[in-house]
């Protein structure tokens, strides 16, 4: 007997020790870790903006139990814990009844957990075992000792899980019925109550009806509802309404929090428009889902009001096959391609050029070591002498290269820095002429800020995400007439017809400046649009840097921008783009690549100028030195191929910056070859060291090259 007593004592001690080590005293419910660690972020109309619905706790959409409909509270108690106000954490009668039923059936079919035990399970998640059930009962006593009944039920009703990762009755009501919990019908309240027991199985209206009927009968038996309310519940048609789901803007919310000027503020009222946000997210997600041919997985959209400097939409999308981390694509630097060109042309207009100024659109080569890099337009088509209006509107690469060479890479680089491009961290020489074509990496956030500067006719002000952020006085980055000219060019559908044709996604109902960009190998596709009030930016690509299949900015991104601009303009008073009063309209004529003032004979065209200087100012050669040889590059090494016959091997000399319609004379090692009116000459290849000399009038250029 003594041995048995020792064994019993040992087992008892072990049981007590195991229990002591397993039990975790619940905290006060108003001090649960992680429950109140961030402020409440609201949209511009005071609606709650969610991070996401995968949080550990419902932080943003809670309500006091005294503000909840009494019928909803009663219905939930009837379903989950009828004796809540009469026990101290564990309902022993219900627990013993459930244990007896489970033993008879040989499996767990009933749990009999009180609200206290369910709260404990939320605080300390454990596997569902008999041992853990014992531990949870003890912790429920501790929960009651440290919290009042009203605090426990309030915590429970705000944190109880529903289907689709929603927590609490407020989220449940908004998710399933599209309304505030206080506006639910009696039947809808009972629907929420029964969903708690089995959220996944009972989230279908048809499956709920028998359960709602039984619950309604119990509520009538305790006089929680009267006869006519019972009849209304029986006759009502239960229907879920998913048309007004909560607006999710997790990346915007995180960015807004980082910009709060009062770190102690419990509520942040943002500038976000919930309607535009929902539409931007819908369009972006749908575009990523319905364009599998482009192998496209990521995208981002910003809509802003450049008059008030407010961000109205900030959407980030991920395609169905994207397996990466959910980065905020609005803030990720990417190559902008041609979408940087408007800032270069605005600088050119400031420097005395006009949209009528001529630039030659012909292939340009740049020295790379002892070889060379060939610049081409996107379409591989070249248009000869062309106006800056046409060059910018058609996003031609060669004119942009010539323009940055004339203006100076350093000068353009510094202007980009003043626009707020913080990710261009290398010196200007690192980017070279390619900076005009967007070879640096910048984020959509900074691009939209820069386009907003153009939309304000050259005044830069930070875009705001919180109503509490002060409106900046503004800094002038470009002159008003120069920025105004850029807007006029980008909104001219006739000017862009060479590359983009007429009609299509780039023509908006209201005068709108538009620009696209596509980086190398179709890795990035951009679209920007601004009118008198709104500016929109769209980026699409793959954040894992995998190329898309042929996606360009003028396709899917521009369609999104156009749709969002139409949405933003609902209820607005349409106006044209602001035209600077300092611009001078002049009728001009173009004859044989020369620009003249209208003489009363030729077909005139209206153009805008910054002054009354004589016409026109032309763009010089691609390096800003005027007439020069571009092929070969300095000290270029060429290879003689012994496998080919000599007559099949040739090289084409080219010059740049030549005057139109004036002959060029060509010399090799001092020997005259021939005279051409074109800027090129084909020369039979031969081994040796050579000097090529090209002359046009009083101008000449010399280069040395080698054939080995």
Image (spheres, rainbow, N blue to C red):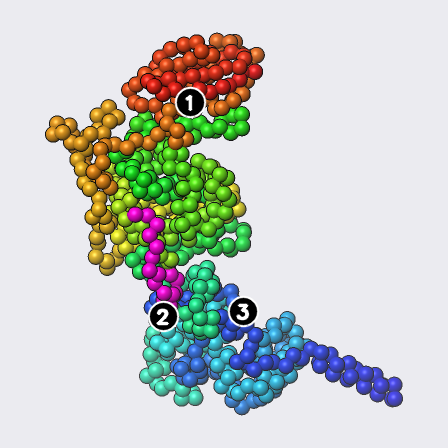
Q: Residues within 10 Å of mark 2 (few under 14, many from 20)?
A: some
Disc 1 target residue: 629
Task: Identify the residue at the far right of this view.
Answer: 2
The kind of secondary structure element at disc 3 is loop
Quadrant of image for the N terminus: bottom right
Q: CA distance from mark 1 to mark 2?
A: 64 Å
Displayed quadrant of residue 193: bottom left
Quadrant occupied by the C terminus:
top right
At numbered mark 2, what does the secondary structure look like: helix, strand or loop? loop
Residue for point 34% across, 42% down = 347
Neighbours of disc 3 within 10 Å: few (<14), some (14-19), many (20+) = few
Mark 2 or mark 3, which has the lower sequence index?
2
Q: Earlier in the sequence, mark 1 or mark 2?
A: 2
- Using the image, determine if residue 505 lies above or below residue 152: above
Residue corresponding to mark 3: 56
The residue at which mark 2 appears reads as 46
In the image, is residue 667 above or below residue 592? above
Disc 3 versus disc 1: nearer the observer: 1
Q: Let me know if residue 423 appears in the view.
A: yes
Residue 373 rendering spot, x and y as whole percentages = 48, 29
């Amino acid at each position: 007997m003594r041995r048995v007593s020792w064994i019993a004592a040992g087992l008892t001690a072990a049981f007590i020790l195991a229990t002591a080590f397993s039990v975790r005293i619940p905290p006060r419910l108003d001090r649960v870790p992680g429950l109140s660690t961030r402020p409440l972020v609201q949209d511009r109309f005071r609606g709650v903006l969610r991070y996401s619905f995968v949080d550990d706790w419902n932080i943003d959409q809670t309500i006091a139990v005294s503000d909840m409909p009494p019928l909803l509270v009663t219905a939930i108690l009837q379903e989950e814990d009828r004796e809540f106000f009469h026990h101290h954490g564990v309902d022993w009668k219900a627990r013993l009844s459930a244990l007896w039923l489970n033993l008879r059936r040989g499996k767990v079919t009933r749990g009999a957990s009180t609200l206290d035990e369910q709260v404990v399970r939320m605080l300390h998640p454990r596997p569902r075992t008999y041992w853990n059930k014992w531990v949870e009962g003890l912790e429920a006593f501790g929960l009651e000792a440290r919290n009042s009944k009203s605090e426990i039920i309030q915590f429970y009703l705000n944190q109880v899980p529903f289907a689709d990762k929603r927590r609490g009755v407020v989220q449940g009501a908004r998710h399933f019925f599209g309304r505030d919990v206080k506006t639910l019908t009696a039947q809808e309240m009972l629907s929420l109550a029964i969903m708690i027991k089995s959220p996944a199985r009972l989230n279908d209206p048809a499956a709920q009806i028998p359960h709602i009927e039984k619950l309604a009968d119990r509520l009538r038996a305790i006089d929680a509802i009267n006869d006519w309310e019972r009849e209304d519940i029986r006759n009502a048609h239960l229907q879920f309404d998913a048309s007004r789901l909560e607006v999710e803007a997790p990346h915007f919310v995180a960015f807004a929090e980082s910009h709060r000027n009062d770190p102690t503020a419990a509520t942040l009222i943002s500038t976000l428009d919930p309607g535009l946000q929902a539409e931007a997210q819908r369009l972006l997600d749908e575009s990523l889902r319905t364009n599998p041919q482009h192998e496209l997985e990521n995208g981002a959209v910003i809509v802003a009001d450049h008059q008030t400097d407010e961000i109205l939409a900030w959407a980030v999308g991920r395609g169905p096959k994207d397996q990466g981390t959910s980065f905020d694509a609005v803030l990720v630097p990417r190559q902008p391609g041609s979408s940087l060109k408007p800032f270069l042309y605005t600088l050119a207009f400031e420097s005395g050029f006009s949209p009528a100024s001529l630039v030659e659109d012909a292939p340009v080569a740049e020295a790379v070591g002892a070889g060379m890099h060939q610049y081409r337009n996107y379409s591989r088509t070249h248009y000869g002498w062309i106006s800056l209006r046409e060059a910018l509107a058609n996003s031609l690469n060669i004119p942009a290269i010539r323009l940055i060479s004339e203006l100076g890479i350093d000068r353009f680089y510094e202007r980009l820095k003043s626009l707020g491009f913080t990710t261009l961290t290398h010196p200007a020489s690192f980017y070279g002429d390619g900076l005009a074509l967007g070879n640096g990496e910048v984020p959509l956030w900074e691009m939209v800020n820069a386009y907003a500067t153009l939309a304000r006719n050259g005044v830069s002000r930070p875009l705001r995400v919180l109503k509490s952020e002060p409106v900046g006085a503004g800094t002038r980055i470009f002159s008003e007439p120069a920025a105004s000219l850029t807007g006029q060019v980008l909104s001219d559908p006739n000017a862009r017809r060479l590359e983009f044709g007429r009609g299509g996604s780039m023509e908006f109902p209201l005068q709108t400046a538009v620009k696209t960009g596509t980086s190398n190998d179709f890795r990035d596709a951009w679209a920007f649009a601004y009118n008198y009030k709104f500016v929109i930016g769209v980026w699409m690509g793959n954040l894992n840097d995998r190329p898309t299949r042929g996606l360009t900015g003028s396709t899917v991104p521009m369609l999104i921008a156009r749709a969002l601009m139409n949405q933003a303009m609902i209820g607005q008073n349409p106006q044209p783009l602001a035209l600077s009063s300092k611009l001078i309209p002049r009728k001009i004529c173009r004859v044989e690549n020369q620009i003249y003032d209208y003489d009363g004979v030729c077909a005139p065209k209206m153009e805008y100028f910054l002054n009354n200087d004589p016409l026109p100012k032309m763009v010089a050669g691609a390096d800003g030195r005027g007439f020069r040889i571009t092929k070969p590059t300095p000290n270029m090494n060429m290879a003689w191929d012994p496998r080919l016959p000599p007559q099949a091997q040739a090289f084409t000399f080219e010059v740049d910056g030549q005057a139109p319609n004036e002959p060029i004379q060509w010399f090799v090692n001092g020997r005259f070859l021939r005279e051409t009116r074109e800027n090129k000459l084909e020369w039979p290849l031969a081994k040796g060291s050579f000097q090529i000399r090209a002359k046009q009038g009083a101008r000449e250029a010399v280069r040395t090259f080698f054939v080995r």
